[in-house]
Image (tube, rainbow, N blue to C red):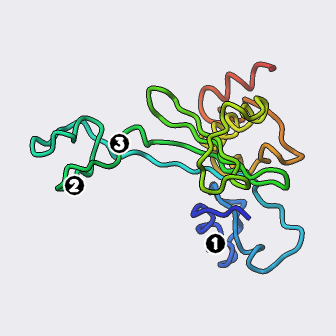
Amino acid sequence: MLVANIDLGPTILDIAGFDLNKTQMDGMSLLPLLRGDKNVTWRSDVLIEYQGEGHNSSDPTCPALGPGVTHCFPDCVCEDSYNNTYACVRTLSTSWDLQYCEFDDREVFVEVYNLTADPHQLTNIAKTIDQEILEKMNYRLMMLQSCSGATCRTPGVFDPGYRFDPRLMFSHGIWAHRLSTRSL
């Protein structure tokens, strides 16, 4: 089962007997899994994000430390930069174990890995995977990045209940109102 740190808060509240339907938490209670309940409906995908730590300054003692790079060590080996800011969706089903990532850089680089065949993520299959799967995973990534509360618990791309509905991506604010007044 795919679990994440967003599940800790709902789990603690569930243990305390709080009605989770009264919260706007993105996660799910792990309590049914911990109790060994049968027929538990669980997520098939999870959002993974990392924000790079680069900055726009330079260090005269280390010429390799230029804009967008941080953590330059005494031997001028620099690590971390803006281009390592990424968002991924990890999807797990009976047929697939995929990770789809988009990097926040000038190239908008995409990586897709079949974690069953390639657990060390050595072969990027973004250019060879079926285009429909690529589009579904791209949509699901956008969906998970923009969701809140119960909308984060909608079916994943390989779940039988999955449906493409761009209105779900804009469930807040003015876009929600504009899209809800138009038919797709």
Judge depth for marks 3 and 1 and give the one in front. 3
User: Tag 1's secondary structure?
Assistant: helix
User: Tag 3's secondary structure?
Assistant: strand
Q: Where residue 46 appears, x then y in whole percent?
A: 66, 53
Q: Where residue 66 appears, x then y in whole percent?
A: 22, 36
Q: In which quarter of the image is the C terminus?
A: top right
Q: How far apart are marks 2 and 3 (CA)?
A: 14 Å
Judge depth for marks 2 and 3 and give the one in front. 2
Q: Residues within 10 Å of mark 2 (few under 14, many from 20)?
A: few
Q: Residue 81 carries which label?
A: 3
Q: Distance between the residues labelled 1 and 2?
A: 43 Å
Three-letter residue code for mark 1: Leu
Q: Residues within 10 Å of mark 1 (few under 14, many from 20)?
A: some
Q: Which mark is residue 73?
A: 2
Report the residue marked by disc 1: 13
Relative depth, front residue between 111 and 3: 111
